[in-house]
Every structure is written in C-alpha cells, then in structure tokens.
Amino acid sequence: MGARQAQKQQSRRALLDAGLHLLADQNLASLGVREVTRAAGLSPAAFYRHFPDLAALGVALVEESLASLHVMIRSVLAGGDGAEEVIDRAVEVIEQHVRDHRPHVRFLSRERHGGVRQVREAIDAELGRFAAEVGAALALQPASEGWGPEDLRMLAELYVDRMVSTAAAFLEALEAPDADPEAERRIAAAAGFQLRLISLGRRHWHGS
Amino acid sequence: MGARQAQKQQSRRALLDAGLHLLADQNLASLGVREVTRAAGLSPAAFYRHFPDLAALGVALVEESLASLHVMIRSVLAGGDGAEEVIDRAVEVIEQHVRDHRPHVRFLSRERHGGVRQVREAIDAELGRFAAEVGAALALQPASEGWGPEDLRMLAELYVDRMVSTAAAFLEALEAPDADPEAERRIAAAAGFQLRLISLGRRHWHGS
DNA sequence: AAGTTCGGCAAACACTTGTTTACTGAATGG
DNA sequence: CCATTCAGTAAACAAGTGTTTGCCGAACTT
C-alpha cells in the first residue's frame, strides 16, 4: 500500500476514533461534522473525503464493533460442550469483552434503538447473523434432536438477546460514578442463573 | 382549577406532544428547544415557563409513558393463573399496547440506553419497579415454593426483559416501511415460545 | 522530468441554535 | 374596579452548524 493510501487511512482512523470518543456521552444523531473533525485535528471539509454523511461514519463504526463481537462469540462456542461450562465461559467472556471494548459496546448499545435508521438496521442485521451462528452451533448438539429449524432460531435469539442485555448491564455498572465490584458480581450471577434456566427449559421441551 | 392553570396545562401538553412527535425520528439529545416550541406553536422563551431543560421534558415523558405501562402489566398479572394463559395474554397485551401507545413505546425503547443520563436512570428505576411487581406476583404462585427472593428477582428480571424486547420487536415491525403482518405473527410466536421455555425451566429448577 | 491525481485547507455561504431581556395583556384576587 | 400575577412574546445576543468553493502541494504515474 502506497504512502498515499496509508496517510488516508490514518486520517480515517482519526475520524473514527474521534467519533467513538465523542459518542461516549452523546449519540450519533446529535454528533456534528465539525465536532468530529475538530477532535480529529482535521478541517471540516476533510470529513467529506472519507464519508458522505455522519450516518456513514456510524455504519463504519458498526462494522468495526461487530468484528470484535464475532471473535467473542466464536470463543464462547468453541471449547467444552458441557452446558454449564459454556454458560460460565460465556458470562466471563462477555464481561471481559465489555471491559476491553467499552466504547464499541457502548456505541452498539446506544445506537441499537437510536435515531439513525441506517445504523439501527446495520446492527440488527448483524445481530441476526449472530443468532444464526449460535443456532447452527446449537443444531450440532445432541440435545437438539427433534428440534425444527424455526424453534432453534427462536432459542438462539433468546440466548443472543440475553447476552446483549448482559453486556449492557455490565456496561452500565462500569460507567456508574461509584464503581462497585459487587454490582458486577450480581450481574454475572443473574446472567448465569438466567442462561441456566433457559437451557434447563430447553432440555425439558417436548415439541412445540 | 382556574382557567389560568388550564391554559398553562394546555401549553404544557402541546410541548409534550410536540416533543413526542419529533422524537419519532431523532433522539432526545439531538432535540432542540426551538424545534419543540416551533412544533408546539409557541415562542422559544415560553418553553422555560414549563421546563428548565430538555432533559426535564424527557423525564416528564418517561413518567407519562410508564404510567400506561403500569396499567398494562397489571392487566397481564390479573386474571387466570394458568401459565399458558398468562403467557398468551401477555403477548397479546404487549402487542396491543405497542399499537395503542406507539410514540411512548418508541420513546422508551430509544432512550433506555440513550444519551441523557437523567432519562436513562428514570427508565431504569421504573423498570426495576416492574420487575419487583412481577416478582411479587410470582412469589404468590405455588410453583415458587423453595425459591429465595434473590432467585425470584432474577427470574422476574428475565421475564420483564423478555417483554421489553418483545415490545421493541413489535415496534420495529410496525415502523417498517412495508407493514408485514406476517412479521408480527412471527414475533408473537417467538415471544410465546421463549416465555414458555422460561417457565418450563422454572418448573424444573431445583435450588441454586 | 513533467504531468496528473487527490487529501487536506481556509474561507465563505446562509442558517439554526440556547438563553436572556423587557414587554404585553388576560386571568385572578382583594 | 383596581392592582397584581404570570404565561406568552418579540428581539437581540454570541455562538454554533453543514456544505461548497477554489486552491495548494505532496505523492503518484508515465
């Protein structure tokens, strides 16, 4: 890659980073082009060399954020099959992920139902793909015998939604002004309990 | 109430309605005082006769939105005890509620993780109170014998969260440009399935 | 070495913004 | 009936906004 492209990528990075940083305490719809370029150390006009819109920057952030999420989900699904172990690992991995990628998680959580349609749709589509991935993994387990693909999808959605909620809860605990380690422990306990309850229900499910 | 107060309330209503209307496709943080007053047919300065902040208007909208939610939750909990019936009724009531109070539901869904802390906290607190209410109702059922209050709370949270997610899903289906009745049916089916799965897991839970 | 591409800039465009000010005039209460 | 209260107004403030323009100069191509 030429030095030309490299410098362009660097500016693009600066814009994305500045955006992500500013989105710590405001949402995409209230972000301004000038605000971002100022924080990135560029002139306002430079923005348009990279994105047509702020919505486009948002979509780029979605892609970035979800790439790291994909890695996470795979690390949960791979490994021991015991339901208990998978659940415990899932909760741990989620907590660690929120810790490592706090700005991205915050962005996703905030914009999932936020004011910018393009971004909302991008997140939703990708979350659907997660559910499909989880569903495929579930289908491979012996406990899924006799389960239709429709049921498996609904089950996977339930798991994914639970994980997203858990991540959001961890996030809120981390952002609280008085960081309380007890709160995190309680969230982890609740998540473990709830996931266990779901998988228990699944084992006792006999046809729909 | 004097005619004086009545007129004031009318203006306040106009501001709240205008705000709620504008929040259909943007979020609170990006709303402007002038924007609201313009839509309400008042002068910008008039806003400050009613609210010190836009955040305050947001909190007022939260209270309004949650009042109607409380009514809803009670109508679910009251009535036949059969788990199946409760679940089916819950899904129906949620769907109807979203239909009847679309702007409020949208507002709650959007601002639950939105950019205004005051509003986020107000929603969260009230949602916690819902969970407590559901937990209290669960405690009365015979199936809760041997369940600690902690477990009941986590279970109630799981139910409430599921309901909120379901409401959000219904909302998104209603807002889709091509209104697809099939999508709503699918959401209702998924919600029923998932709630059933949870209550099945609950019945087979033996201590934590 | 000459010519082209193109990322970044400063400046200008025409608005929109939040908030305060001094005011008006109808409802209120004595 | 007269004084007071107070919701609502118009006007002004100093900023801030998105986007376009023409231009520069370093990196590429031939």
Image (cartoon, coloured by chain):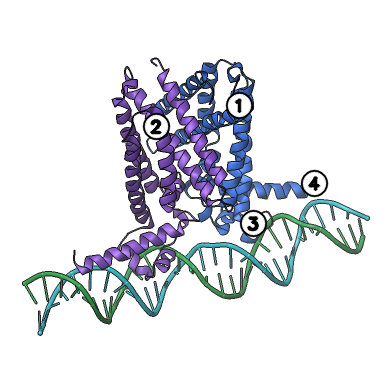
Chain colours: A blue, B purple, C green, D cyan
Disc 4 and disc 2: Cα gap in Å?
Answer: 66 Å
- Name the amino acid type tagged 3: Phe
- Do the residues marked 1 and 3 share a common chain? yes
- At 57% across and 56% down in the image, what residue appears? A38
Disc 4 and disc 1: Cα gap in Å?
Answer: 52 Å
Q: Earlier in the sequence, mark 4 or mark 1?
A: 4
Q: Chain of mark 4?
A: A
Q: Residues within 10 Å of mark 4 (few under 14, many from 20)?
A: few
Residue at mark 4: A2
Q: Which mark is residue A47?
A: 3
- Do the residues marked 3 and 2 share a common chain? no
- Do the residues marked 4 and 3 share a common chain? yes
Residue at mark 2: B85
Question: Does residue B157 sit above or below B115 in this rendering?
Answer: above
Q: Chain of mark 2?
A: B
- At 38% across and 69% down in the image, what residue appears? B44
Q: Earlier in the sequence, mark 4 or mark 3?
A: 4
Q: Nearer the viewer, residue B173 or A66?
A: B173
- Name the amino acid type tagged 2: Glu
- Mark 4, mark 1: which one is toward the viewer? 1
Residue A166 appears at what percent x and percent y?
Answer: 47, 32
- Name the amino acid type tagged 1: Gly
Residue at mark 1: A148
